[in-house]
Amino acid sequence: MNHTYQVKLDAFEGPLDLLLHLINHYEIDIYDIPVAQITAQYMHYIHTMQHLELNIASEYLVMAATLLAIKSQMLLPKPEILDEDTEYEEDPRDELMQRLIEYRKFKEAAKTFHDKEMEAQQIFTRSPHVFENTERRAPVNQGDVSIYDMLDALGKMFKRKQWEKPLETRIQRVEIPIEKRMEEILDKVKKNKKGVLFDELFPEKTRPYIVATFVALLELMKNNQVSCRQHKHFEDLYIY
């Protein structure tokens, strides 16, 4: 029987967050965005999310349409400036650039406040009351890899292993518990002190298995049980 499903991930913060990730990852000048390049990379992520049948928020698709519209405008020939009275034509990238700059400011401010909060959690003052079973939480160390790096690795894995089709569009209704995949991943990582290659976590090419593994890995990182690292940009990801 045909079985359709969708998975919603709260880890995705929005299209501006994805664009900012791409700008940082590819060391792009935010004041002079190469629209063709950024659009191609953005669509790569969108197609990977659609391929996994993740529940993509409509704002991601709106941004995709916006990027394609800007790209089309950039391809149009620019009118010649005949005299000083000619009205200045606004760069079609300006609005997006301003939105990204503002978003980056808020993101950096949020990180500053988060860092201060984490520092405050490590400070304990003596209290007149006695508290039992006081636990000191270790700082979260999820590695230097974001969810977008992991999504990019998935997309590249699909291409390398030629998993684009069929990824079993007709499947049996088999539940793959996230908790079980978490245990399996954790067991595999514990047995490999030098780290596990990201691709090795996906031996089966069924969509439910891939999605379950992806979500399980995110949960393990969220719980500070594993970390995902990339030694250099564009290199393989490893789980520790």
Image: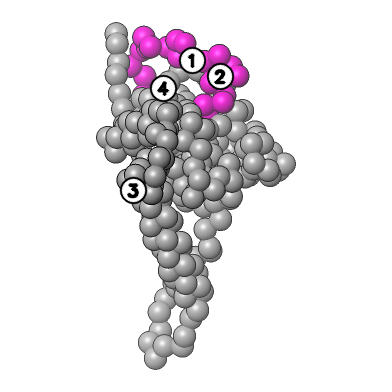
Q: CA distance from mark 2 to mark 3?
A: 52 Å
- Mark 1 and mark 4 in contact? Answer it, CB < 8 Å: yes
Amino acid found under the numbered disc labelled 1 = Glu
Q: How is the image coloured?
A: one colour
The residue drawn where x is 50% and y is 79% is 123
Identify the residue position indicated by label 2 in the image.
159
Is residue 129 depicted above or below 205 in this figure?
Answer: below
User: Tags 2 and 3 in contact by the CB under 8 Å rule?
Assistant: no
| Residue type highlighted by circle 3 | Asp
Residue at mark 3:
85
Magenta segment main secondary structure: loop
Is residue 164 covered in magenta?
yes
Q: Residue at x 36, y 9 (%)?
A: 170
Instruction: Classify mark 4: helix, strand or loop.
Output: helix
Q: Say few, some or many: other residues with alpha carbon within 10 Å of mark 3 (under 14 / 14 to 19 / 20 or more).
A: few
Decide which of 55, 136 is in the foreground and name it: 55
Residue found at the very far right of the displayed protein: 194
Q: Which residue is mark 4?
A: 51
Residue at the outermost front position: 83
Q: Residue 164: give x, y in percent of width and height.
A: 48, 15
Q: Is residue 140 magenta?
A: no
How far apart are the alpha carbons under marks 4 and 3?
51 Å
Q: Earlier in the sequence, mark 2 or mark 3?
A: 3
Label 2, secondary structure: give it: helix
**Quadrant the C terminus occupies:** top right
Q: CA distance from mark 2 to mark 1?
A: 7 Å
Contact? badges 2 and 1 (CB < 8 Å): yes
Where is residue 114? Give x, y as percent: 44, 65
Visible residue check, residue 34: yes
Residue at which label 1 appears: 164
